[in-house]
Image (cartoon, rainbow, N blue to C red):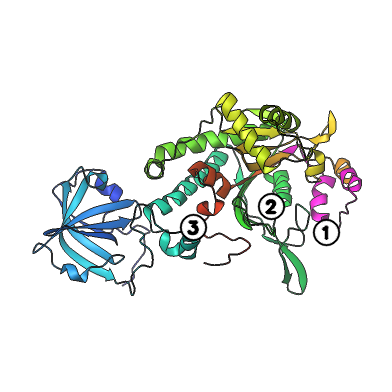
């Protein structure tokens, strides 16, 4: 007899959301999960189960359950049966009065860190060393549920705006950004690099689909050891054609932030409350020119302008502070960065070629986005390369798209971990990175 798979097998164990949907009070249900914590109160023992949607409180009463309490340990995977009873003091307002427990697996060792505490008493380095375990803490894992919501927001908003998702290669012949911050590797007896950015590919595909986006890792071989840098991070990129100006790119990012904050508010309330996160207002985001931003900070905070071509981290922080004080805004677009500090493909401002039609988005004083309009004219691009003393060697496929015609276009890249870090109010980007890769860390 032939058996078929239909893609939908009903399971007896219920999820938390199913119980919360109602109709189960006074009924026997089956639930599975890990034993998060055992609280022995004497005659009554509370056994807290950890599930993907949260915690479930169960009540073990001596003589009422089929198993000895001595057989149960924390982090054991179990399947339980019990009566659903309303209890306002329990997580989610109900508890299960246990009737039976079936052990699914037993831990071989006790946990090296108490993941069932509200806040783990462990350093960041310890939490990262034990990351596969410490992520079982409900507050630790809530960070990455929120990060998932940001990613959902990016995908959902751009799909609604007619963007096509692409996946570009992460092994290439050369970097898109130039410079020495490349991870080099041998590729079947050829020299190759890990991608710093999907820049060339997303521009190519903007000439195919008009609007494209990608969510993928990028790699920067920078020997830094700061709280804001990683050597591998997730970049949220998009590129869009037929723009009127780089303002279109900033408007699109503003729309993404509005969509995402609404999504987080509606579907991630539990995680936001666990971490005491207050979502920023994004109904309007101010913008300021790069040179004017430096002047404002110098005047307000009596700070001498030392580098006229770039923003120092302290300047970024002060710009964020200025716009919070003046306008109550957590975000600010800083526009018209100097051409000297932007890649060759950045479109120069026709009114003043010393500056570009580009921007960074600062969130509470930290750069989380870089973007702008790109050069789309073939001759203009070749002239820019020549002016910089650069060769087009190794970029033949990239140059090809301009030789055969490209529409006005532009785009941006957002650092997912940095955005998450600032949203959570953390000081170190590693707090918002599942398994960080930095100058000292390759494991876990």
Which of the two labelled residues, at mark 1 and mark 3, occupies the earlier sequence position?
Answer: 3
Looking at the image, is mark 3 or mark 2 nearer the viewer? 3
Query: Residue tagged by mark 3?
Result: 124
Q: CA distance from mark 3 to mark 2?
A: 31 Å
- Most extreme residue toward the left, as rendered? 63
Query: Residue tagged by mark 2?
Result: 198
- Most extreme residue toward the top, as rendered? 326
- Badge 1 crowding class, 10 Å Cα cut-off, few under 14, some 14 to 19, many 20 or more, is few
Which residue range is magenta in the image? 383-410
Q: Secondary structure at mark 3?
A: helix
Residue 316 is inside the magenta segment = no
Residue 391 is inside the magenta segment = yes
Q: CA distance from mark 2 to mark 1?
A: 16 Å
Q: Position of residue 16 (x, y in %)?
A: 29, 50
Q: Residue at x 61, y 60 (%)?
A: 438
Residue 180 versus residue 332 in the image, above or below: below
């Amino acid at each position: 007899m032939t058996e078929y798979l239909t893609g939908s097998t009903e399971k007896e164990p219920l999820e938390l959301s199913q119980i919360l949907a109602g109709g189960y009070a006074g009924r026997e249900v089956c639930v599975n999960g890990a034993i998060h914590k055992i609280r022995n109160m004497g005659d009554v023992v509370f056994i807290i189960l950890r599930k993907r949607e949260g915690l479930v409180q169960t009540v073990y009463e001596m003589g009422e359950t089929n198993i000895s309490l001595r057989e149960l340990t924390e982090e054991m995977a179990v399947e339980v049966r019990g009566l659903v009873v309303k209890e306002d003091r329990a997580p989610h307002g109900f508890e299960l009065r246990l009737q039976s427990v079936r052990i699914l697996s037993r831990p071989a060792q006790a946990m090296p860190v108490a993941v069932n505490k509200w806040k783990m008493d462990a350093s960041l380095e310890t939490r990262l060393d034990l990351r596969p375990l410490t992520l079982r803490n409900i507050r630790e894992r809530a960070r990455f549920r929120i990060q998932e919501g940001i990613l959902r927001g990016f995908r959902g908003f751009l799909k609604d705006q007619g963007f096509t998702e692409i996946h570009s290669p992460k092994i290439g012949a050369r970097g898109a950004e130039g410079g020495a911050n490349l991870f080099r590797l041998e590729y079947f007896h050829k020299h190759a690099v890990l991608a710093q950015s999907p820049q060339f590919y997303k521009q190519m595909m903007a000439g195919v689909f008009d609007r494209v986006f990608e969510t993928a890792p990028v790699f920067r071989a920078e020997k830094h050891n700061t709280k804001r840098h990683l050597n591998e991070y997730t970049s949220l990129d998009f590129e869009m054609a037929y723009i009127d100006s780089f303002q279109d790119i900033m408007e699109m990012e503003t729309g993404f932030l509005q969509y995402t904050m609404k999504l987080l508010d509606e579907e991630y309330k539990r995680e936001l409350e666990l971490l005491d996160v207050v979502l920023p207002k994004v109904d309007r985001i101010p913008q300021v020119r790069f040179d004017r931003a430096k002047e404002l900070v110098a005047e307000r905070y009596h700070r001498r302008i030392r580098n006229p071509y770039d923003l120092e981290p302290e300047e970024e922080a002060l710009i964020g502070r200025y716009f919070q004080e003046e306008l109550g805004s957590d975000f600010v677009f800083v526009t018209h960065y100097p051409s000297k500090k932007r890649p060759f493909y950045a479109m120069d401002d026709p009114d003043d070629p010393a500056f570009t039609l580009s921007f960074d988005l600062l969130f509470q004083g930290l750069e989380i986005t870089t973007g702008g309009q790109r050069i789309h004219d073939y001759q203009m691009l070749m002239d820019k390369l020549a002016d910089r003393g650069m060769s087009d060697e190794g970029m033949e496929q990239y140059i090809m798209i301009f030789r055969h015609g490209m529409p006005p276009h532009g785009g941006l890249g957002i650092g997912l971990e940095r955005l998450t870090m600032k949203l959570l109010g953390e000081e170190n980007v590693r707090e918002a990175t599942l398994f960080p890769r930095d100058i000292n860390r390759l494991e876990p």
